[in-house]
Image: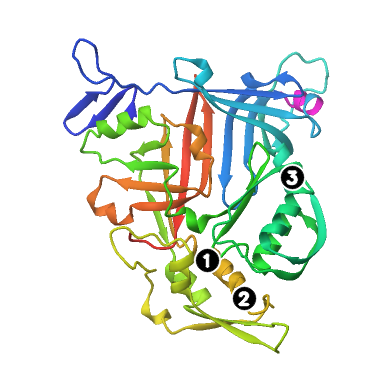
Amino acid sequence: MIYNGNKIIKGGVVNLAGTAETGERQFAQSRTYDLILTIKDQDYSNDLISCQVVSSVNSIYNIVKLELFLDPNDILVDITGEDPLKLSIVQLGEANPSNYDRLDFDLIYIKSGFEMPIRERSENISQKDRTSFVITCVVREAYKTMTTLVNKIYMGKTMQEIIEDLVQNNTNATLTLDTDNINTEVLDQVLIPPSTLSNSLKYLDNTFGIYKGIANYKCSNDNVVEIRNISKKLNMNQTFTIYQLAIDTDSLNIIEEASTKDNVFYTYDNILVQYSANSKMSILSKNLKHIVKPSDTLSYEIEQDLEEVSKEYGLIYSSRIPDKKIQFDPIIENRTRYYTNHTGYEKDSNFAISNITKATANIMNVSFRVERNMNLLPLVRSGESVKFNTEIQEYVRLAGKYILKSTILVFEKSRDWEAVAMIYLMRSNKDS
């Protein structure tokens, strides 16, 4: 537990801040936050009491929830769905304000909810009966981009050419397309039915497979459509490292590193672990047979071993143990499942690899809470590689690389703004 610069440890309390007289190392938890909210050019920062920012691989843009404390009449008169909202989250604590990290959101009002307390009938009431007013928002330009209507027929094009045309010729967004292990088949004919851009990307991935691996697509706060093969991210350099500290060590080197580096975090929180291999494997089956319908024959069978596909194209991470696999009950070993509801594309197996690796991506989930000393920017980068380390020897087998599945940043106002991050990581195998 960290409280006012002191850490409670076995046998007493150690002062992390230190003093010039004692010559102890200098350290203090100094980062705080400032939240600035404007609605229709009116400043509501003082009325804002909590804020959540959600970033997830399952969401095509960031989601923001705002809670204000307002009089119901002010809500009805002054705040409507057509009003633009702007939110800035500024991370304080550095000597030079120009170096402050910040998240800026231009938001669109999606929905809201509040209670209207009973009161007198008269309109001439000076007293304000404030109530909790919760607004759910998404990023304006990202929402506009991902809901853009598209409809086109492509002849003799590759996946990369189709995606580039969809994004660049239909939206004002910039495209960042990961080409590592992208589907390189020249597709004879692709019909994109009238649909949003996000649904069109989902259609391409489910029907043909964007990658031999797990495709993740979203639009960032600055209107960049990012399409990435997160299967390849697992073995790349991590975006940040998170340490679970033991309660019987001072861990000053890690705490000091977290105070000086933007990509290092630590927690004393319990780690929640969820492992669902038997559940997933019993539904998917280890032996997979896809019956597709190519143009030159009545049918064709694509055979796959789920474990081998996951190992080559999924989120299996191995560091200490070579040739690591998914752990499941042997009773599932001989189960076979036939997939007959997908026509496929000729005899190509990209679609099957894509769909199977997505299904096994989150067999292993770990989640935990991080408080204080948080640099915000790495935490909203869902889909990136994250390294989890633990000082507790019995838990080392769970350490290693994961994919950042989602983050919920929670800001609560007491005297000052305080922040907590709920972090959710995923991969396919348990032991590393």
Viewer-proximal residue among 144 and 109: 144
Closer to viewer: mark 1 or mark 2:
2
Q: Secondary structure at mark 2?
A: loop
Mark 1–mark 2 distance (CA, rounded to whole Å)? 16 Å
Q: Secondary structure at mark 1?
A: helix
Q: Is residue 260 magenta?
A: no
Q: Earlier in the sequence, mark 1 or mark 2?
A: 2
Q: Position of residue 320 (x, y in %)?
A: 28, 59
Mark 1–mark 3 distance (CA, rounded to whole Å)? 27 Å
- Disc 2 residue type? Asp
Q: Is 403 rendered above or below residue 248? A: below
**Residues drawn in magenta:** 71-77
Residue drawn 77% across the image and 28% down it:
79
Mark 3–mark 2 distance (CA, rounded to whole Å)? 31 Å
Q: Quick check: can you spot residue 155?
A: yes
Viewer-proximal residue among 371 and 390: 390
Where is mark 3, residue-wise? 145
Where is mark 2, residue-wise? 348
Q: Position of residue 418 (x, y in %)?
A: 48, 27
Q: For residue 25, which quarter of the picture? A: top left
Question: Image check: 247 left or right of 233?
Answer: left
**Residue 357, label in figure:** 1
- Disc 3 residue type? Thr
User: For the residue carrying disc 3, how many other residues have a C-alpha within 10 Å: few (<14), some (14-19), or many (20+)?
Assistant: many
- Disc 1 residue type? Thr
Q: Is 128 rendered above or below residue 345? A: above
